Image: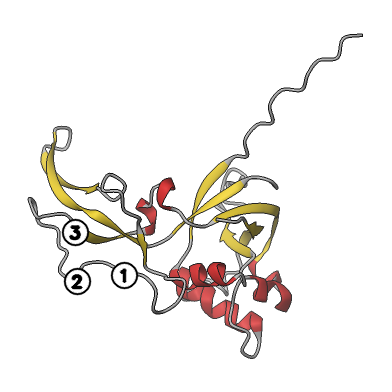
Amino acid sequence: MTTLAAGPTPAPAERGILFSGPMVTALLAGTKTQTRRTQRPQPGQGAASRNPFGQPGDRLWVRERFFALGHWQTRRNARKGREEWFFTDLTRQQGLAWRYAQAHDAGSGAGGDPHAARIAGAAPTWHPRPALFMPRAASRILLEIVGVRSERLQAIGAADALAEGVVPDGDPVRAYRAVWERINGAGSWDADPMVWVVEFRCLPA
């Protein structure tokens, strides 16, 4: 009997995921091992929501606010019939490393140029960039999914609230409610939406 050699193990799927500044701080401190995200659409609002984050073993690379060396330029958008701004990131081309809004500690690293502005033809300098526009190469935090489940937001207990990275001061669930409403707006907690609960571990950088 001929034994067929096993093929190469496929690489884990990777997806980007946005985190706010305080949650990036919790990730760096090792105190955050869960995240809750609202399901879209909610049950009864159309097609069933599908888990967009992946399965255990898949990876999530963190998008956060950062600084990039570069400059702004304009170019003509023929379809829209107007000039549009775009940012050219020169960080890697210049052999430099991206900088981050959330430093590992309060005194480490430099941020952006306080005089940076959207001016065509200006010399390259360090500009603040939204988390949404972080390229994969700039991400410094990689997470491995260990579990995904679906539940109501208010089903969270004290242990899970602490795993969300809240500062343990009094009632962890109340502290997490404040974090949720700061991110999602007033009334978002009382709406008690169905959420995806993603559990993960931080992989070595």
Secondary element type, mark 1: loop
Q: Name which of mark 3 and mark 1 comes first in the sequence.
A: 1
Instruction: Please name the residue that numbered disc 1 is placed on.
Output: 110
Q: Is residue 43 visible?
A: no
Q: Amino acid at mark 1?
A: Ala
Q: Amino acid at mark 3?
A: Thr
Secondary structure beneath dot 2 equals loop
Residue 190 location, x and y as percent?
A: 57, 74
Name the residue carrying label 2.
114
User: Which residue reaches farthest bottom?
Assistant: 170
- Residue visible at 7% across and 50% down? 121
Q: Dot 3: within a 10 Å radius of its alpha carbon, few (fewer than 14), some, or many (20 or more) residues?
A: many
**Coloured how?**
secondary structure
Q: Quadrant of the N terminus?
A: top right
Q: Is residue 10 above or below residue 163?
A: above
Q: Nearer the viewer, residue 75 or 204?
A: 204
The circle drawn on residue 125 is 3
Asked where in the image residue 177 lies, by quadrant, the reply is bottom right
The three-letter code of the residue at mark 2 reads Pro
Q: CA distance from mark 3 to mark 1?
A: 13 Å
| Residues at marks 3 and 2, CA–CA distance in whole angstroms | 10 Å
Residue sitting at 17 percent across and 52 percent down?
71
- Find residue 198 and report its horizontal and vertical position in percent: 65, 57
Which residue shows up at 21% across the image and 67% down it? 113
